[in-house]
Every structure is written in C-alpha cells, then in structure tokens.
Image (cartoon, rainbow, N blue to C red):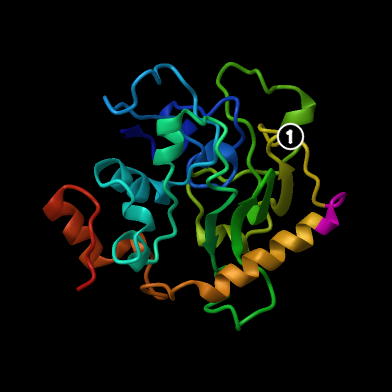
Amino acid sequence: VFAGDNGGCPKYGTSSYPLRGTKGHTFEGGTKVRSFIYSPLLKNKKNEMYKGLFHVTDWVPTLMDAVSPGWSGHEDLGLSYGLDGKSHWEALLSGNMESDVRTDFVYNIEFLPNMHSVNDSKLMPRGAIRKGDWKLILNQPCQVWEDVGGRYSTPNYTTQCKSIPYKCSIDARLYDSSEVDVGDWLFNIKEDPFETNNLINERTDITAELKASMHNLITETYPRVSIENNRGTLQNAVARWKEQGCISPWIK
C-alpha cells in the first residue's frame, strides 16, 4: 500500500493542482491524496481506478479482511473494536470500482480557540464533513488554488479570498486576526471537484442538514487528550516519536 497523508505545501515547492487549498486545511487540496494498492490477490485488476469514497480509517478493516476474510464483520473481531473504518476489500476483489461502501466521512472537527466543549458555545467548531456528493466546511480560513504555473490567475479564482494564511497549517491565533478571511463553504464535489462554486447561501437545506450532522458527531466524540497543550507539542508524544522513529501510541 502506498498512500499520502495530506496535500502539498507551496512553501516547500509542492502543489495540489488542480485541487483547492493546501496541507493543514480541509479543502480537497489539503486532504485528497493519491494512493495505490498492489496484491497478487487482486488478479486482473491492473490499472483500475477505485472511485468509491475511501477514508484513512478504512485501511485497517480493508487490509485485515485481505489477510483474514470476514474479520471486519465478525462480532468477536472487527466489530468488537467499534472501528470507524469500513472494509473495501470485497469491492476491490470483485472489481466494483464504483462501490458505495462509504457514503460519508469526517474530514476534521476541532473546537475554536474560545471553545473547550460543545456546551461552551452555540457556535459550530471548525471542521468539514462529507455526505454523499455534498461537503460542508465551517469556520475555516479561505484557501486558493496553489499553482506555480499560473493556471488559476484569472479574477474568478484570485478574488475569492480576501487574504490567506501564510502557513500550511491552522494556527489558532489566526482566528483572532481581522486580516484572515474565515468563512463557511458548501460544495457538490461530484459536480464541482475543484471547489469553485460555494453554494452555502443557495442550498440552505443541505447546509442545515450537514450542520446538524456535525453537531451530532461532536456530542459523540471523545474529549481531547489535552486542552492546554497542542497535540503536536505534548512531551510524551514527541519523546515517543523520537524513540520509535514514527508516530505511535504515547498514552499509557
């Protein structure tokens, strides 16, 4: 299995063209990555493109079903873990490249700097979710189409953001700045894969439905490991990373 973990960062000379946005943000350019899988079990499946929705959490049940058929659906095995992931192995084996194994997923949900729990404010946190063809992005800094070739140099693209963050990550301090264009977006990804047409005001019905879904997800999530410290600077996490040479569990 070969898979990317996030989109490109223009600061280091990479581009997610033709997708919108960069690493650290929930536009497609920050989250949609190329991947491919090879296995002698997938006979006669060369050069085929899987068009079903696939989330990073789907790798575990998919690969476990490859080595132990039926693992993900067994009540004493896969089901006992309460995984968020879904297995796509049968779809891959059968050649069903249009699979609807997954119809929705969470891109990310995080609380705004002035929120410590869902009960602290009626404001929605920042994040994005997908249901079917629809994608809702809330409270995110505006992002443009990063492309060194100038293929998005027309006003239709360059004027969509009043300003954009410098870094390829979301800094909490950005939300206290009047210089950053923070907003909400609704896209039909099937019809508009490059996120050029914001339908947040036209399709208020879809917006309300997805906001309700996101709020329900918030109430079901586990509390953050640390409110006071950013997860990337937790001493135990960093120490574990240096010790193992990769990201691994650090909570005992």
The mark total stands at 1
Q: Is residue 93 above or below residue 78?
A: above
Q: Position of residue 98 (x, y in %)?
A: 57, 32
- Label 1: few (<14), some (14–19) or many (≥20) C-alpha neighbours in 10 Å: some
In the image, 219 versus 163, the foreground residue is 219
Q: Position of residue 243 (x, y in %)?
A: 12, 54
Q: Is residue 177 left or right of residue 185?
A: left
Q: Position of residue 114 (x, y in %)?
A: 58, 74
In the image, 142 versus 184, the foreground residue is 184
Q: Is residue 195 left or right of residue 167?
A: right
Is residue 203 in the magenta section? Answer: yes
State the image quarter where residue 204 is shown: bottom right
Q: What residue lies at 35% left-to-right and 65% top-to-bottom?
A: 75
SS for callout 1: loop
In the image, 133 versus 203, the foreground residue is 133
Q: Is residue 77 above or below residue 196?
A: below
Is residue 195 in the magenta section? Answer: no
Q: Which residue is mark 1?
A: 196
Our reading of the magenta stretch's main secondary structure is loop
- The amino acid type of the residue labelled 1 equals Thr
State the image quarter where residue 72 is shown: bottom left
Q: Is residue 144 above or below residue 119?
A: above
Q: What residue lies at 38% left-to-right and 18% top-to-bottom?
A: 44
In the image, 49 versus 136, the foreground residue is 49
Q: What residue lies at 72% left-to-right and 49% top-to-bottom?
A: 185
Q: Which residues are magenta?
A: 201-205
